[in-house]
Amino acid sequence: MNVGIIGAGIGGLASAVRMRAAGHDVHVFEANGYPGGKLHRKSLGAYRFDGGPSLFTMPHFVDELFKIAGKSPQDYFNYERSNEACRYFWEDGKQLRAPSDPELFAKEAERVFNVPAEELTDYFNHIRQIYQHSGKIFLEQSLHEAGTWLNKETVKAFLKITQYDLFKSMHEANRVRIGEPHLVQLFDRFATYNGSDPYKAPGILNVIPWLEHGFGTFFPKGGMEEIARSVYRLAKDMDVHFHFNHRVDRILHDGRSITGLVVNGKTQGFDLVISNMDIHFVYQRLLKDVSPPERILKQERSSSALVFYWGIKRTFEALGLHNIFFSERYKEEFTALFERTDLIDDPTVYIHISSKMNPSDAPDGAENWFVMVNAPHHQDQDWPKIQQKVRKQVLEKLSRHLNTAIEPLIEEERIWNPKDIEQDTLSFKGALYGNSSNSQFAAFLRHPNRSSKLKGLYFCGGSVHPGGGIPLSLLSAKITSELIQRKNPAHA
Ligand SMILES: Cc1cc2nc3c(=O)[nH]c(=O)nc-3n(C[C@H](O)[C@H](O)[C@H](O)COP(=O)(O)OP(=O)(O)OC[C@H]3O[C@@H](n4cnc5c(N)ncnc54)[C@H](O)[C@@H]3O)c2cc1C
């Protein structure tokens, strides 16, 4: 079949590889001049930055793409496991260098917080079980196909998951199971891994730290952009056709089936279309003649981000690859993000320093700081004004914690705000992860991977099932291609 893919984000790239490996002729249209979408680089003077994602888990989902193409992953993509997951800093002076390994984490947390290591080991066992029972149902298959629910295994597992804090918030579950306030805050933070609020998101999402501590954290050689670049190189070697700076304007159909795409004003015929574009813009811009699924589209958007890329002309021993400086007003921080679409005066600050792993990302004796605070989705806020205010607060917080004036050390600077994120990656309201997961039903209210109205139209990427983040976007491509194979067995 002749397959058109809209967007070369990680979901679109993975779909291209899967479709080509199944023998189809594949064309990818990308509005930007580079592959990867949110997963891209920013260069400032002698500094290279991971532009978007900074945390890499579940690398086997990337490796799988090389394997299905009959290639050795190491010929394209290499990564290292990190022993340290993150360094955490609190305002009361407490600090934790969190090992990735659950047992070592429990021991270190016992040393710093005087919490019996067995309690944390029990917690890790609990979240491992959540993954074992819920991962397959919620992440690895469509929730919108009858076949899923005719499978006895799925139904059995589904009945079981109600035991996993589905009706408590993540925070409430952590408060009951862990208790120690610093550690509760540490585990609550994992709600931000899909742009959600731990005081609202269901406790079953406490599975997220299992991805980091059970499967481990990794860093790609050459930086995060290599995740997308290596899959792009693979797709090119497989003769996928890429068309950069080609924005798709319309999806064409005859009322029942897909017939093609309008790209840069020109019509091109396709038997099948996979959209990696944010689902909101698909209906708003490319399918204006199809009635949109209102209930799905009105779901709350995930949070966005305010990112400061700073070239810092000094190195800091106290900092690692990932660092978190917590706010003391955590609940209020999320209330501001999701209810007032605003930021508090003392937001939690995350710093990612890829030059700790990849020294060529910064000049000798310097570091590349990717400094991020969670921000509300874009809703016509005055971002230039907000970002100047937040910049001051962040500099003040970091200077205090690190006992060093940071501003004079900045020799390169760029800021990326939620409006920029919307414009540069065509993500509705600049949300990083599509819809938030702030309700028990969120998993069921993401857009399906297949159109129920138009035959031959499929969807992948962070704005559809199973959700945002690199691992889930890769899984969306897998689910989509399995659906295509099932619906078109003659072409498989
Ligand atoms: C600042 C930031 C930090 C993040 N941190 C992490 C992290 O640490 N770990 C993690 O796993 N995830 C993280 N994420 C989320 C992660 O980046 C995304 O969930 C994932 O990359 C989404 O991939 P996608 O397949 O949906 O495509 P996207 O990256 O959204 O790309 C979609 C592509 O489609 C193109 N496109 C859209 N419309 C059209 C059109 N009409 N015609 C042609 N092309 C079009 C766009 O130009 C874009 O390139 C972060 C994101 C950001 C922005």
Image (spheres, grey):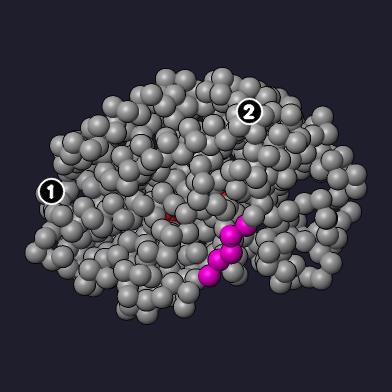
Would you say residue 298 sits in the magenta stretch?
A: no
What residue is drawn where x is 42% and y is 20%?
167
- Place residue 102 in its image quadrant: top right
Q: Specify the amino acid type for callout 2.
A: Val
Q: Specify the amino acid type for callout 1.
A: Gly
Mark 2, other Cα within 10 Å: few <14 / some 14–19 / many ≥20:
some
The image's mark for residue 226 is none
The image quadrant where one finds the N terminus is bottom left
| Residue 329 place in picture, x, y as percent | 70, 25
Q: Name the residue under label 2.
A: 184
What residue is drawn where x is 47% and y is 43%?
433
Q: Distance between the residues labelled 1 and 2?
A: 52 Å
Most common secondary structure along the magenta stretch: strand
Viewer-closest of 114 and 73: 114
Q: Name the residue under label 1.
A: 255
Q: How many labels does the image show?
A: 2
Viewer-closest of 460 and 292: 460
Mark 2 and mark 1 in contact (Cβ < 8 Å)?
no
The secondary element bearing badge 1 is classed as loop
| Residue 296 place in picture, x, y as percent | 33, 33
- Mark 1 or 2: in front is 2
- Position of 146 with respect to 398 (left or right) is left
Q: Give, as a single range, the part of the protein colored magenta.
A: 78-82
Decide: is 213 above or below 369: above
Mark 1 beta carbon near ligand 1 (under 8 Å) = no
Residue 477: in sight, yes or no? Answer: yes
Mark 2 beta carbon near ligand 1 (under 8 Å) = no
What residue is drawn where x is 47% and y is 27%?
203
